[in-house]
Image (tube, grey):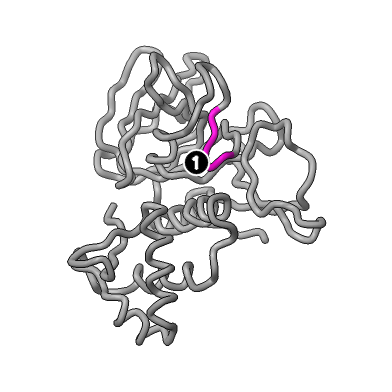
């Protein structure tokens, strides 16, 4: 694959095997070498340790709930060790400090602080870039914990120029989560998500019967897809357990 999204967001594939000591995140696993693994890479300007630094596409809720066996132990999300993460969120607060700028970002699943350290030696330091409140940004950074409080140390923060990137990221994060918790998601799950994204159900959502008729798939399949998407935190039920709406950012 070699898909490229807005804002410098890229997904790269390579044959599974090797690279386990990079401390990164891969999905797609190898079954007899027949599948490919995929990872998200940091923008070229931010790669400091290796030529390609893997990043896990996550939601803020996943970051907050990442497991640690003991203090300073590696973080684990969906059972895999994760160091670098990338996510999209709305800027809720900005707190400039002498050595860093702290952002409070909200992606609809949670709120977390993101710290971007300033480099006094660089006159054109991109970390000094201003972002408007309530605008969307993408973060690439390292998951950290200080005094039992999670935060992300950002390598790069870039404005989201196209709202489609928010949806692309959420779908990517959902795919990875479902892959590692329930196996590869069925194509129907992705199709239902895309259909809901383009529907006009609003906050009231769309009933499974309507989705079934519109997509020409069984009501049982729709309910299964809705359950998977809701458990992943990207949809929610509204007036009843069979009416689904996309989580509003």
Q: Pinpoint residue 66: horizontal percent, then vertical percent.
A: 47, 33
Please give left or right for residue 50 compared with residue 164 in the image. Answer: right
Tag count in the figure?
1
> Is 24 placed above or below 241 here?
above
> Is 202 placed above or below 76 here?
below
Q: Please tell me which residue lies in front, 40 or 185.
A: 185
Q: Main secondary structure of the magenta part?
A: strand
> Is 104 placed above or below 206 here?
above
The furthest residue to the right: 32
Give the class, few, some or many, for how many residues have Cα within 10 Å of label 1's Cα (few <14, many ≥20): many
76 inside magenta stretch:
yes
Task: Say which residue appears at 41% left-offset and 35% top-offset.
Answer: 65
Task: Say which residue appears at 57% left-offset and 39% top-offset.
Answer: 79
Task: Say which residue appears at 30% left-offset and 74% top-offset.
Answer: 199
Task: Say which residue appears at 31% left-offset and 76% top-offset.
Answer: 208
Residue position for label 1: 86
Q: Please tell me which residue lies in front, 54 or 66.
A: 66
191 inside magenta stretch:
no
Quarter of the image where one finds residue 220: bottom left
Q: Pinpoint residue 73: horizontal percent, then vertical percent.
A: 56, 21
Q: Pinpoint residue 119: horizontal percent, then vertical percent.
A: 49, 18
Q: Please tell me which residue lies in front, 209 or 128.
A: 209
- What segment is highlighted magenta in the picture? 75-79
Q: Quadrant of the N terminus?
A: bottom right
Q: Secondary structure at mark 1?
A: strand
Q: Pinpoint residue 210: horizontal percent, then vertical percent.
A: 30, 82
Quarter of the image where one finds residue 104: top left
Please give left or right for residue 140 compared with residue 161 in the image. Answer: right
């Amino acid at each position: 694959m070699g898909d490229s999204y807005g804002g410098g967001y890229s997904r790269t594939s390579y044959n599974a095997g090797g690279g386990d000591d990079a401390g990164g995140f891969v999905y797609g696993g190898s079954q007899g070498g027949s599948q490919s693994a995929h990872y998200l890479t940091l923008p070229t300007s931010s790669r400091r340790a290796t030529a390609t630094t893997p990043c896990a596409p996550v939601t803020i809720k996943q970051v907050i709930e990442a497991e640690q066996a003991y203090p300073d132990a590696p973080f684990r999300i969906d059972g895999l060790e994760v160091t670098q993460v990338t996510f999209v969120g709305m800027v809720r607060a900005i707190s400039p400090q002498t050595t860093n700028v702290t952002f409070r970002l909200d992606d609809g699943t949670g709120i977390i602080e993101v710290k971007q350290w300033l480099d006094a030696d660089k006159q054109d330091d991109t970390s000094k870039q201003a972002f408007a409140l309530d605008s969307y940004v993408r973060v690439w950074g390292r998951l950290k914990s200080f005094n039992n409080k999670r935060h992300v140390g950002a390598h790069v923060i870039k404005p989201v120029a196209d709202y489609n990137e928010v949806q692309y990221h959420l779908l990517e994060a959902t795919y990875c989560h479902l892959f590692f918790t329930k196996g590869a998601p069925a194509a129907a799950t992705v199709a239902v998500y895309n259909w809901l994204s383009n529907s006009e159900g609003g906050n009231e959502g769309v009933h499974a019967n309507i989705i079934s008729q519109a997509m020409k798939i069984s009501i049982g399949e729709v309910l299964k897809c809705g359950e998977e998407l809701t458990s992943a935190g990207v949809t929610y039920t509204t007036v009843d357990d069979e009416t689904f709406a996309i989580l509003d950012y």
